[in-house]
Amino acid sequence: MIWHLYDYYLRPGGGYFGAKKATQTPDPIYGYDDHSIWLVSSQYVDAKGLKLQARLLNLDGTQKFSKEVALDAPADSTAKVFTLPHIDGLSPTYFLDLRVTDDSGKIVGSNFYWLSTKTETLDWAKSNWYTTPTASYADYTSLSQLPKVKLNAASRSERVGEDEVTHVMLENPGKSVAFFVRLKLDQGKGGDEILPVIWQDNYVSLLPGEKREITATYRAASLKAAEPEIGISGMNLE
C-alpha cells in the first residue's frame, strides 16, 4: 500500500495528503450514512473555544447552506455536532467544506468533500466476509462541467540550514471552486521536478475568493544552482 502514499521517486500522491488529513487534530468528519457532522479529537488535552463551520456549495460556486457551531472538544473524544438538513436545488455533484477554528480564529482542522445527489448503494445480498459489492454508484460526471478558474499565484523562497523552504501563495479570484489543485517544484523553468519534497499540503481545493499559503521543504542542493519554478495544475484551471 506504500505506493498509494508516494512512488519510486518519492513523489507524494493524493493518498499521502489524504492520510495526513486523517491524522489532524481536531478532525471534522462527514458521515456518509446519515449526513451528520462529527468532530474527532485524538489529542490528550481538552480543546476549548472551538468553532466548527460547514458550508455546502454547488458546482457553480453558489452557497446553498452554512452553519457554524461553537463547541469544546474533550481529550480523546468523538462528538456528533449536527446533521445536515435536506437542501433543495443541489447540483448533481456538490461540495461540502468543513473547518474548525480555535479561539484566535486560526484554522486547526479542515476537510473538503465532493458529494453526489445520486446515492451509492451496496448489494448486501451478495456480501461475504471480505467484500460487499456495489449495486449502483454515485455519479460524479458533472465535475467535468466545472467552470474554469484562473488562479493568482506568487512564491518566495528562503534558506533554512541545508534546506530550502518555498512559500506558495494561491488566490482564487473567481466565483467557482478551484478543484483538486496540484503544486510541484522544478529545477528552474523546464527542469526536472525536485524530489523528495515535503509539502505542507497539496491536491487542495480553494473556495471562491479564498487565499492560501502552502510551504514546500526540500534540500537546497536539489536546486543545482537553479531557481525553483512552481508548477500548478488542476481539474478546472485555465
Image (cartoon, rainbow, N blue to C red):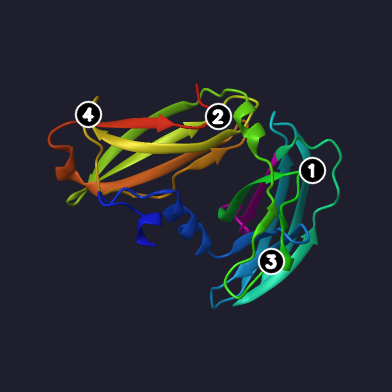
Q: Nearer the viewer, residue 81 or 50?
A: 81
Residue at mark 1: 65
- Residue 163 rendering spot, x and y as whole percentages: 21, 49
Q: Earlier in the sequence, mark 1 or mark 3?
A: 1
Residue at mark 4: 188
Residue at mark 2: 172
The answer to the question of whether label 4 and label 2 lie on touching residues, with beta carbons closer than 8 A, is: no
Q: Which residue range is magenta in the image?
A: 94-106
How far apart, in angstroms, are the residues tagged by discs 1 and 3?
37 Å
How far apart, in angstroms, are the residues tagged by discs 4 and 2?
25 Å
Give the structural element (helix, strand or loop) at label 4.
loop
Placement of 36 over or under 204, stated as above or below: below
How far apart, in angstroms, are the residues tagged by discs 4 and 1?
43 Å
The amino acid beneath tag 2 is: Asn
Q: Earlier in the sequence, mark 1 or mark 2?
A: 1
The answer to the question of whether label 1 and label 2 lie on touching residues, with beta carbons closer than 8 A, is: no
Give the structural element (helix, strand or loop) at label 3.
helix
Q: Is residue 127 left or right of residue 229?
A: right
